[in-house]
Amino acid sequence: MREYIKAVEQHRNLSFEVMKQAAKCLFDEQTSKEEITQFLLALSAKGETANEVAALAHVMRSFAVDVNATSARHMDNCGTGGDGVNSFNISTTAAFVLAGAGASVAKHGNRKISSAAGSQDVLDALGIHTNFSPTETTELLEQEGIAFLYAPNVHPKMKRIGEVRRAIGQSTIFNLVGPLTNPVALQTQFTGINRPDFIMEYAAVLQMLGRERAIVVSGAGGMDEASLAGQNAFVLLDKGDLIPFSLTADEVGLAKADLSTIRGGNAVENAAIIHSILSGERGPRFDTVVFNAGIGLFSGGYATTIQEGVKLATDSILSGRALEKLETVVAFSEKISQKEVVR
């Protein structure tokens, strides 16, 4: 591991094959936490490359638990996190909206590491636990078109690295690879990063990993979501082409709003926000969710334009279908919990 740390500290980029070897060292129990910390911080200081991100994602995905979902067209809308905006859980909320609009969403997520409330923290507050087996996850995904995959459950070799990440307390390359390591085979994806300089490279990583179609966003104000606050930068991966474009909220019929209007809180507070949005409470939070869900529907091929996607997302909420998806997943979770008590 020392040679990889030295190379990165000297600001040398690692090739795909060399990074694969370094990644295997990261997951090796013989590698000390101090060495893992040094490597991750050195990579962050140097700046990660597409090859490094793709290689780590490849290795991490190879260690994941198998989730044998059907051949249906599944997507994920998990972002990288670490943007420091302290928004409520936008992508988690949007996942229910996507499912309510007919998409099949296998959402990857974790507890808080560099945010006030991670996706699984807010799911707990909503009544959705983490203890689904791969079979139960597949059952839920096939029945309802939505399932949440808790990263430590599907990536058991991440335990030590998770401890290191929490100790570091800042974004690392694992934020970048998180959305890329879903154990469900994904055909399409909508993901965000808070680095506008890296969106083309990140889209190239998705291409390297075999996505048929995907969108990467870096939002206004440094968000890893599409923002109402200004111009958002995107790259669309479609049929092998990488197509950059930009978009503002008003271009799809939504009002501009400052980042302060979408601030969240702890898991319980964010769960209440999610309920209010899915119950149809209008405002910047609602608009942010339908903006992102609309882009997700366009990315997944469920809408021919983002404008159409926003309309479908709005209807998913106002029709009650998005809230119904939430209630169904909560009920499924409760059923699983009761089975465990009986055992």
Image (spheres, rainbow, N blue to C red):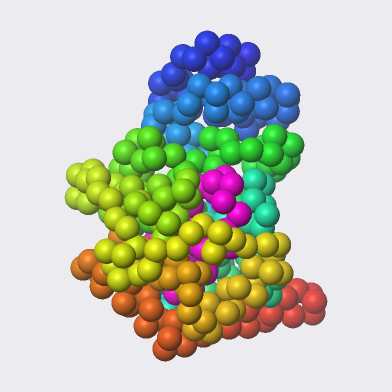
Compared to 297, does 53 lie above or below?
above
Q: Residue at x 47, y 87 (%)?
A: 320
Q: Residue at x 48, y 69 (%)?
A: 284
In the figure, is residue 197 to the left or right of 323? left
Q: Looking at the picture, tell me which residue is in the foreground, 193 or 339.
A: 193
Q: Residue at x 62, y 33 (%)?
A: 27
Residue 4: x %, y % from top left: 56, 16
Residue 23: x %, y % from top left: 54, 29
Q: Is residue 222 magenta?
A: no
Residue 126: x %, y % from top left: 66, 74
In the figure, is residue 274 to the left or right of 343? left
The number of callouts visible is: 0
Is residue 163 visible in this depiction of the protein?
Answer: yes
Residue 128: x %, y % from top left: 65, 72
Is residue 154 visible in this depiction of the protein?
Answer: no
Magenta segment: 74-97
Q: Which quarter of the image is occupied by the N terminus?
A: top right
Compared to 37, does 129 lie above or below?
below
Q: Looking at the picture, tell me which residue is in the foreground, 157 or 330.
A: 330
Compared to 78, does 290 lie above or below?
below
Q: Looking at the picture, tell me which residue is in the foreground, 302 or 55.
A: 302
Q: Looking at the picture, tell me which residue is in the foreground, 118 or 285.
A: 285
Name the quadrant containing residue 13.
top left
In the figure, is residue 299 to the left or right of 153? left
Q: Residue at x 37, y 75 (%)?
A: 313
Q: Residue furthest bottom?
A: 319
Q: Which quarter of the image is occupied by the C terminus?
A: bottom right
Q: Is residue 78 magenta?
A: yes
